[in-house]
Image: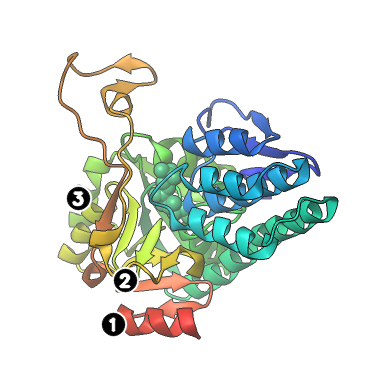
Amino acid sequence: MHVTPLRWTGESLELLDQRLLPGEEKWIACRTAVEVRDAIRDMIVRGAPAIGITAAFGIALAALRGDDVRAAAEMIRKARPTAVNLMWAVDRMLRMLNPFPPSARLGMTAVTEAEAILREDVEGNMRLGRYGAELLGAKATVLTHCNAGALATGGYGTALGVIRAAVDAGKKIAVFADETRPYLQGARLTAWELQRDGIDVTLITDSMSGHFFQQGQFDAAIVGADRIAANGDTANKIGTYTVAVLAQAHGVPFYVAAPVSTIDPACPDGSRIPIEERSTAEVTEVFGKSIAPAGIHVRHPAFDVTPARLITAIITDRGVLRPPYASSIAGIVNG
Ligand code: MRU
């Protein structure tokens, strides 16, 4: 059974503390919307769809407690800026709960909706996985970046969902995982969850991917997404753009795997996607130990934008989108 990043107990939301993986598997209980907001902000839970699902349960907790649902929703919405699944889930919950008369029924309605978001995400990942698996040969080596796996979703994965579905279909898939500096989602999370499932995974540092592209090691690169603009430009973990450029330079297909809830039709292109800047300590320190001179200037954009022209296809839960993305995305969002 694949790992899941969260579970609803009936009265609290339990989150697997992803900051401690792979060393320790510790579950943290959230009982209020504030605790949920803090858990998203502090990366106890991360990955665009998982953040959205967590937000939905945070709003459900507010409704169950008789707290101000609208205020809770607006607080949670601001926890992280780039992953649009967060805003998508908050808006879906608000639409369902409007006009918010506090009652026991409101709490139950909110829990039911959050559970639906969770269930639909896992089902969508499995569909997306099957669509994506068809794009891979019977034997393939795939490069992935960051963690777009079970830990980043309701429990199956987008990029890693494609890999799981391909393995389940009997294909011989080997995965190379970028370590993903500075937060190390690749080394800590992707390597862990694939190894746990018995999938062939090799860990490399981000700076090694060019070398392996040059050696003809990769048949495809598959990554997740935090926000896909209406023209197909895609924000994902910092370093994704580098992988896309390398893939194009070496004639390797570059796939983005994401549910339709990651598409932001109101965002015309990548220049309008807000990019989160995170703490400089995540760059200057590794596990609390300083690796840079004190006082050094540091930048830490947590995401970058891959232009649509570098993306071979976008694998969604409603099918595989091909360029030109402005029309294929409009078709799927409106269809
Ligand atoms: O900062 P993170 O760990 O939340 O960033 C996660 C990513 O960039 C993932 O690739 C993306 O959210 C897709 S998860 C299916």
Q: Which residue is mark 1?
A: 324
Task: Give the percent coordinates (x, y) of residue 221.
Answer: 33, 60
Q: Is mark 3 within 8 Å of ligand 1?
A: no
Q: Residues within 10 Å of mark 3 (few under 14, many from 20)?
A: some
Tag 3's secondary structure? Answer: helix
The mark lying in front, picked from 1 and 3, is 1
Task: Give the percent coordinates (x, y) of residue 145.
Answer: 36, 50
Residues at badges 1 and 3 in contact (C-beta under 8 Å)? no
Q: Which residue is mark 2?
A: 232
Q: Which residue is mark 3?
A: 210
The front one of 150 and 114 is 114
- In 3D space, how far apart are the residues under numbered discs 3 and 2 (Cα atoms)? 24 Å
The front one of 34 and 230 is 34
Q: Is residue 54 visible?
A: yes
Question: Residue at image x 42%, y 67%?
Answer: 263
Q: Amino acid at mark 1?
A: Pro
Question: Residue at image x 58%, y 45%?
Answer: 71
Task: Give the percent coordinates (x, y) of residue 260.
Answer: 49, 70
Q: Is residue 166 above or below residue 182?
A: below
Q: Residue furthest right?
A: 104
- Could you tell whether 205 is left or right of 202 in the image? left
